[in-house]
Image (spheres, grey):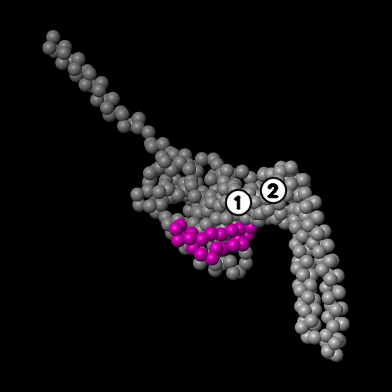
Amino acid sequence: MRTASLLIGAAALALTVPACTQAPSRAQAPESVPVLVASVIRKDVPVEIAEIGTVQAYATVGIRAQVGGVLEKVGFREGQDVRAGDLLFSLDARPYQAALKSAQAALARDTAQLETARREVERYAELAKKEYVNQDEFDKIRTNASSLDAAVRADEAAVEKATVDLEYCTIRSPIGGRTGQLMVNAGNVVKANGDDPLVVINQIEPIYVAFAVPELSLPEIQAHAGSGPLEVQAALAEGGGEAHAGTLTFVDNTVDRSTGTVRLKATFPNHDRTLWPGQFVDVRLKVSIRPNALVVPTQALQTGQQGPYVFVVKGDQTVESRKVTPGAAVGRETIVEKGLEVGESVVTDGQLRLVPGTKIVIKTGLAEAKS
């Protein structure tokens, strides 16, 4: 019995040993990691400052009545485009027409009296020389003529004021633009220079985009602005439509000490009316062109404990981790100041599965990674 047990154990051991010795022969080589790559290239790169801006009307006018009265007519619809000089409102002009006629009548009366007084002065001047009248009486006649002359000038001013008040009964648009909400309808009595405007008109063609940049960027902006207008691109923050091209037209004369920024404005033609007052937009101010800069796709850059790095493809289709010094990001590309050479390939997709020395296989879609 004991002999049979030993034979069975020996047989089991004989079967186990070959199995252990054959296991290494079935081990497979490490699997290659599929990645996308792009080449390191040199190109002229625009140096840009990217900020968030707000769209502002080129001009805003709150229309108020300069005389009081009953609002007889509204000459536009809410949200309508108007041109400079278009009729907006008409007030009841009858009280002002009557005031003008009264002022004109007073002017005519005093003018007639002045003419009579002047003739008396001429006549009494001759009599005074011959001493037919005393000097006191002559002085009274001259004083009366002077008083009437002043009265005529006052009447002329009253006629001028009444004429202006009558003209104010017709309110016309001072600018071309788009009307907002109508605040007062026809039939209401309006006050002269009331607190609230009757309507607000915004000029939106052209239009402003206001934004702020760090004060450290101001010297560079000033240095390049002297050679010509700087280009500004604005795109809707929601990502809709193409970017709009404009020019920098305003740099504030002071730095906001609470934020450390300088306020700027760019002017856009806005012929298609895409930009609208109050919108938020992504703004890019092109300051200059950096020639022959070394660039890689921004998605190739990774951040580790030692700082920014990229995976560089070696000749044996493995990768190495290389520390780089990135510069400004422009669109989907980033300038690399140090760490790479022209023509090297960097991994742009699949980095999560990579460590230095990992074998790779380049996936189709290289053109997509380079774009």
- The amino acid type, in three-letter code, at marker 2 is Val
**Residue at image coords 61%, 53%:** 56
Q: Residue furthest bottom?
A: 130
What is the secondary structure assignment of the residue under circle 2?
Answer: strand
Is residue 258 on the magenta stretch? yes
What is the secondary structure assignment of the residue under circle 1?
Answer: strand
Query: What range of the chain is rendered magenta?
Result: 246-270
Q: Which mark, residue 84?
A: none
Residue 164 image-quadrant placement: bottom right
Q: Which mark, residue 190?
A: 2
**Residue at image coords 76%, 83%:** 136
- Image position of 230 with respect to 114: above or below: above
> Percent x, y for residue 283?
57, 53
Specify whether 18 is left or right of 140.
left
Residue with the mark numbered 1: 55
**Residue at image coords 83%, 73%:** 114
| Residue 67 appears in the rendering | yes
Mark 1: few, some, or many residues within 10 Å (few <14, many ≥20)?
many
- The amino acid type, in three-letter code, at marker 1 is Val
* Mark 1 or mark 2, earlier in chain: 1
